[in-house]
Image (tube, rainbow, N blue to C red):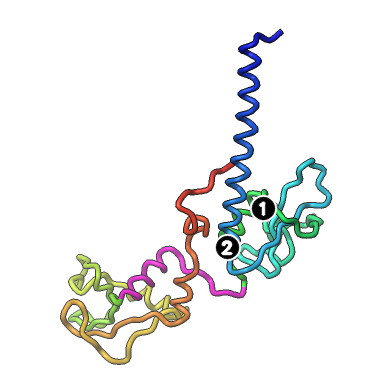
Amino acid sequence: MLQIDQREALARYEQELVEEQRRRKERERELWERITAATPFDLTVRTDTHSNLDAPLRHAAAAIDLLTGARRQHPAGRALCEGITHTNLMALSEPVDAHATCHRCVHAAAVARPSDGPEPPTKKERQELERVEAGAVFTVEHPQGREIRDTSEQSRSPGGDYGRKVTAVMKRLHARGWVMSDAETTDSPWGGRGWRWNLTSLGAAALAIPAVPRWVEAAPSAPTAA
Ligand SMILES: [Zn+2]
C-alpha cells in the first residue's frame, strides 16, 4: 500500500511525463513548420498503411525527385527515409494534416534539394566562391609567372605578397562554370593591376544553395533529438 506522499509523488511524476511529451510534440511541430516554410518544394506527410503501431510514424514525401548529400536520391512519391535503395517500399497513406514524426524523413527534408537543381559547392569551394564574390581574386603577373591569387590573404610562398595562390581551385571552379575572369585588367587591392575574377550567374546560384540544414538557418535554437 502506497503512502499518501508516495501517491502524490507518483501523480506528479506522471503529470510531468505527460507535460514533457506535450512539449516534445510541440517542438517537433514547430521544427516541421520551419522546414516546410524553407523548402523550395512541397512536402506531404503520410503514414505507412501497413504499420501495426497504435501511432504509426508519419513520413514525408515530395512530388519531385530530391537529392541529399552528394548524390543520395529520394524519388518522388516515396517516403524520404527510404531513398532509392529500399526494395520493400512502404504503402503510403493519403496525406495527413499533421507534422512528420519520422526523424530520418525530417532530417532529409531539412537538407534536400531538387535533383534537377545545381550541385552545391563543397565547403572549401564555397569559401573560394565567397572570396571571388568579395572581389578579392585576381589573375596577377609577377616574376614567377601568371597566377591566380586571393589577394585578401598573404602567403609565404614565392609571390605570396600578392596573395594566396588559388590557381588550381579557380580552374576547377571555372570548369564548373561558376567563375570567370575579366577580359581587361583593373586596379587590384595590392596596388598593381590584374584580371579580376567574378561569379557567373551559375556560381551565384551555387553559392545560394543552403550549405547547412535549413532549420539551422531558420531557427536560433537547434532541434532537440527526441
Ligand atoms: Zn520516414
Q: Residues within 10 Å of mark 2 (few under 14, many from 20)?
A: some
| Rendering coords of residue 226 (x, y %) | 59, 41
Q: Which residue has dot 1 on it?
A: 99
Residue 48 vs 70, above or below: the answer is above
Q: Give the residue displayed 24% in from the left and 67% down from the top.
A: 153
> In the depicted view, which residue is nearer to us: 188 or 21?
21
Residue type of the residue flagged with mark 1: His
Q: Which residue has dot 2 on it?
A: 37
Q: Give the residue displayed 33% in from the left and 76% down from the top.
A: 167
Q: Is residue 4 rendered magenta in the image?
A: no
- Residue 12 sits in quarter: top right
Query: Is the Cβ of the residue at disc 1 closer than 8 Å to that at disc 2?
Result: no
The dot on residue 164 is: none
> In the depicted view, which residue is nearer to us: 138 or 9?
9
Q: Give the residue displayed 18% in from the left and 77% down from the top.
A: 190
- Can you say which quadrant of the picture contains the N terminus? top right
| Rendering coords of residue 73 (x, y %) | 65, 64
Q: Earlier in the sequence, mark 1 or mark 2?
A: 2
Residue 215 vs 175, above or below: the answer is above
Residue 82 vs 142, above or below: the answer is above
Please report the bounds of the magenta region as a residue range: 116-134
Q: Give the residue displayed 63% in from the left and 37% down from the top.
A: 21
Q: CA distance from mark 1 to mark 2?
A: 12 Å
Residue at disc 2, secondary structure: helix
| Rendering coords of residue 36 (x, y %) | 60, 61
Residue farthest toward the bottom in the current orientation of the protein: 184
Left or right relative to 188: residue 200: right
Q: Is residue 127 rendered magenta in the image?
A: yes
